[in-house]
Amino acid sequence: MKWLTCCSYVDYDTVAGADKFGNVFVIRLTSNTTDEIDEDPTGTKAFWDRGLLNGAPQKVETLCNYHVGETVLSLQKATLIPGGSESLVYTTLSGGIGMLVPFTSREDIDFFQHLEMHLRAEQPSLCGRDHLSYRSYYMPVKSVIDGDLCEYFNSLDSSKRRSIAEELDRTPAEVSKKLEDIRTRYAF
């Protein structure tokens, strides 16, 4: 059971939500469930159809999970710049503002996953906590890349930036440019 604090429709089959423990998630109805609902809009078939051990016959699949660390109070689908792509913007109890941004290509996903992995290994947390276990506090991180951690690349000294960029087969300027591109595509 999730203790929801807010939710937002993403599309007909997809909902984004947040719970009181600081987790943000996106869930989607499976395609066969959507077809069943379209065939029987009254829901009587679904009411009488029982799953295994009287469980719900319709299940959702989890697309992504992420622990923000603060209670999320609002979650809205928004476009922050004219002509920009939509993203999910959330605000937290202590005044934090964050975004969930969809990637447009598999190349970007691979690049930022590797950058996050290198930064996680290169830069230990200030409080000594393991980054991955923190972001997976209640549920394992799934399909989310920590943009704050990736942005930390520009704060590293030049030798560390160079070594990480070489691991990614890029120059430090190319990595910084890629970070700037993703930032300007959605926010500012």
Image: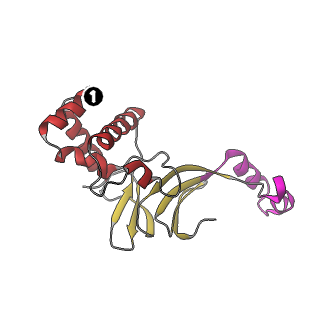
Quadrant in which residue 74 is drawn: bottom left
The secondary structure that dominates the magenta segment is helix
Q: Which residues are magenta?
A: 28-55
Q: Is residue 61 left or right of residue 157?
A: right
x and y percentages locating residue 154 in the rendered image: 18, 45
Q: Residue furthest left?
A: 158
Relative depth, front residue between 36 and 3: 3
- Give 103 or 85, whichever is nearer the viewer: 103
Which secondary structure, mark 1?
Answer: helix
Q: Residue 24: image x %, image y %?
A: 48, 59
Give the image's coloring scheme: secondary structure
Q: Nearer the viewer, residue 96 or 70?
A: 70
Where does the image place residue 4, in percent across and percent down from the top left?
A: 55, 69
Looking at the image, which residue is at 36% across and 54% down? Answer: 129
* Residue beneath disc 1: 167
Please give the name of the residue rendered at 21% of the width and 31% of the height, measured from the top-left corner.
163
